[in-house]
Image (cartoon, helix red, strand yellow):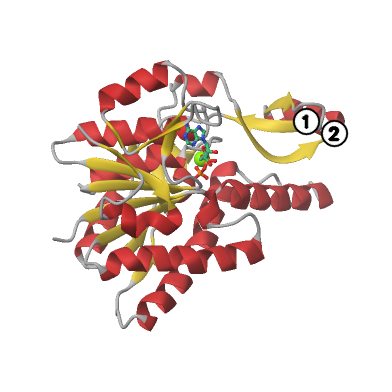
């Protein structure tokens, strides 16, 4: 029986620059097409670290060239641009791979706004560095004129830091569900989604923040009523004592075991920790739901239960 699967693609699925992304997406499309060929319904979410960094840097250069004409581009707009560009590459790559296998299925990207809580404590403590390194003068100017938060980054210069609030809900969820129902392969919540918050009336305002793509994928998987959340990354399995002599790769993990390992500090914040947290939250969100963390190339084997770390109750 085909499952409804939300796939969260990590950085290695997209590469670090334009030519890398073109090559990486070919491989990524094969891995995704393998699942579609087996009769699964697939919804794709993805990260955008290098891409949004590139766009943000380009827009900042534009402002530098003529500050009167080009006011700084809001981060929410940079995220939207990255969703469009990555969605284009995925639509192009997947269409070709599916047609090569005789599968005639539409692939469509939904520019996705994700609601965050303006009172999220993350806004009081911005920690996520984004964009290019700046001189002290450039940094001071942005702090004074635009209220940016900046940090001095390990002697390499100054960088803007933004908040990483928790995703609350997906604004375009009805459209995403309708498209999945219609048989389309949907790309949504790219880069964790465009962070927005409600102001007066029906207005949604873009937030100067970035949402973790693993957490956004978890909300997406719950809201489309997926059976499985697959987080595809650069390791085949989750380990305890990662990188140490006693390193141990895990085939299975219950939410209780995961919580224990989290409290013992086995998963690095900002990389493996959000994945394990997202996997646990999804696995506990309803009976029968499970999560899988594995290598991009192993997605098919992982779904068949042959590899990866499965997280379920
Ligand atoms: P992605 O772009 O897929 O989100 P990240 O770099 O954020 O990738 O997270 C995946 C990385 O987490 C792995 O490549 C690995 O180096 C690192 N990692 C940290 N702790 C662990 C652990 N306990 N088990 C496995 N990998 C870990
Ligand atoms: Mg990551």
Task: Say if residue 89 shows up in the picture.
Answer: no
- Above or below 292: residue 39: below
Q: Which residue position holds label 2?
A: 135
Check the picture and name the quadrant holding the C terminus: top left
Q: Dot 1 surroundings within 10 Å: few (below 14), some, or many (20 or more)?
A: many
* Residue at (54, 53) in percent of width and height: 12
CB of mark 2 within 8 Å of CB of mark 1? yes
Q: Dot 2 surroundings within 10 Å: few (below 14), some, or many (20 or more)?
A: few
Residue 275 horizontal/vertical position (percent): 41, 36
Residue 292 horizontal/vertical position (percent): 32, 44
Q: Tell me if the residue at label 2 has its CB under 8 Å from ligand 2.
A: no
* Residue at (48, 30) in percent of width and height: 247
Near-viewer residue (142 or 193): 193
Task: Say if residue 210 shows up in the picture.
Answer: yes
- Above or below 94: residue 127: above
* Residue at (29, 56) in percent of width and height: 176
Q: Which residue position holds label 1?
A: 158
Q: Which mark is residue 242?
A: none
Check the picture and name the quadrant holding the N terminus: bottom left
Q: Which sits earlier in the primary sequence, circle 2 or circle 1?
A: 2
């Amino acid at each position: 029986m085909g499952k409804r699967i939300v796939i969260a693609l990590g950085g290695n699925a997209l590469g670090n620059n334009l030519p890398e992304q073109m090559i990486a997406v070919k491989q990524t499309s094969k891995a995704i097409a393998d699942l579609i060929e087996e009769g699964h319904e697939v919804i794709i979410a993805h990260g955008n670290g290098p891409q949004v960094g590139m766009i943000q840097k380009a827009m900042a250069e534009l402002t530098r060239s003529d500050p009167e004409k080009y006011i700084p581009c809001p981060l929410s707009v940079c995220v939207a641009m990255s969703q469009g560009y990555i969605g284009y590459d995925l639509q192009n790559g997947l269409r070709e791979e599916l047609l090569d296998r005789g599968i005639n299925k539409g692939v469509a990207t939904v520019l996705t706004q994700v609601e965050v809580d303006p009172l999220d404590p993350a806004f009081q403590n911005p920690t996520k560095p984004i964009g290019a390194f700046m001189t002290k003068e450039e940094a001071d100017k942005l702090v004074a004129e635009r209220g940016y938060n900046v940090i001095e980054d390990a002697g390499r210069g100054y960088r803007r830091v933004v908040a990483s609030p928790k995703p609350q809900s997906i604004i375009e969820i009805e459209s995403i569900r309708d498209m999945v129902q219609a048989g389309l392969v949907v790309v949504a919540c790219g880069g964790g989604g465009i962070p927005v918050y409600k102001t007066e009336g029906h207005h949604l305002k873009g937030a100067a923040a970035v949402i973790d793509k693993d957490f956004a994928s978890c909300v997406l998987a719950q809201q489309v009523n997926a059976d499985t959340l697959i987080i595809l990354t650069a390791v085949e399995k989750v380990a305890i004592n990662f990188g140490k002599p006693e390193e141990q790769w895990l085939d299975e993990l219950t939410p209780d075991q995961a919580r224990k390992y989290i409290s013992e500090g086995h998963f690095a914040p900002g990389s493996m920790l959000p994945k394990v947290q997202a996997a646990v939250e999804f696995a506990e969100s309803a009976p029968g739901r499970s999560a899988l963390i594995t290598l991009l190339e192993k997605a098919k084997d992982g779904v068949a239960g042959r590899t990866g770390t499965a997280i379920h109750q």
